[in-house]
Amino acid sequence: MLQRMLGKGGHKVFSEIRIAGFGGQGVILAAAVIGKAAAIFEGGYATMTQSFGPEARGGSSSAQVILSSEPILYPYLTRPDILVVMSQEAYTRFAPELKPGGILIAEQDLVRVGQIPSGVRAYGVPATRLAEELGRKVVLNIVMVGFFGAAVELLDADALRKAVADSVPPAMQKLNLQAFDKGFEYGKQLMVQLAENGDSDAAVATLEGA
């Protein structure tokens, strides 16, 4: 889709994404999947940088991904267009950095979202619950990637699925692809519901409350 978008009147794509949570949630893997989908399976360009808190597991963790239809000259994020948060600490720390008119995607059972700035689209995803339905809470990160794919429509679903399969051990591919599909389907259902009911920037949109 990066290349298809570039073909529409020469429109250039440049998107800054931050994914954040705590150690052990698979933040870095989620970012790597998105970057790989863009750079390897869509023929675009991507960079990824990452940072950790004082502890690898349980401490803060964030990854920054830049996607572009042209070579990226500066690999570090300035202000994200898209913020994906999986912990309250991550939301509190990084939400003020979100660009006006940006997109916020939050794990709705782990993050309590405060006042949403005008123009920001905010979505809540029960990623932990959806992952638990598959029997493994650990794949909540890939559920979030699936939702990202459906809600943002920046990358093709097939490219993201290929990137998921290419980023995990063979024995874990089936589970992770199921997690991606769960998140993607939830996202598609939410987008349909919002289209029918009207999108509002005053509240976090979820299937329970859209």
Image (cartoon, rainbow, N blue to C red):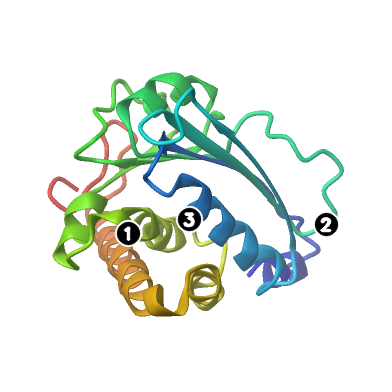
Q: Specify the quadrant of the image occupied by residue 49.
A: top right
The numbered mark, 1 or 2, whose residue comes first in the sequence reads: 2
**Crowd tier of the residue under label 3, counting other residues whose Cα lies within 10 Å: few below 14, some 14–19, many 20 or above:** few
Q: Does 185 sit above or below residue 105? A: below
- Of 100 and 58, the residue lying toward us: 58
Q: Which residue is mark 2?
A: 70
Q: Which residue is mark 1?
A: 139
Which quadrant would the N terminus be assigned to in this image?
Answer: bottom right
The residue under the point 71% across, 65% down is: 39
Q: Which residue is mark 3?
A: 152
Instruction: Say left or right for 32 vs 5.
Output: left
Instruction: Say left or right for 167 vs 141.
Output: right
The numbered mark, 3 or 2, whose residue comes first in the sequence reads: 2
Cα–Cα gap, marks 3 and 2: 19 Å
* Residue 6: image tag: none
- Of 53 and 192, the residue lying toward us: 53
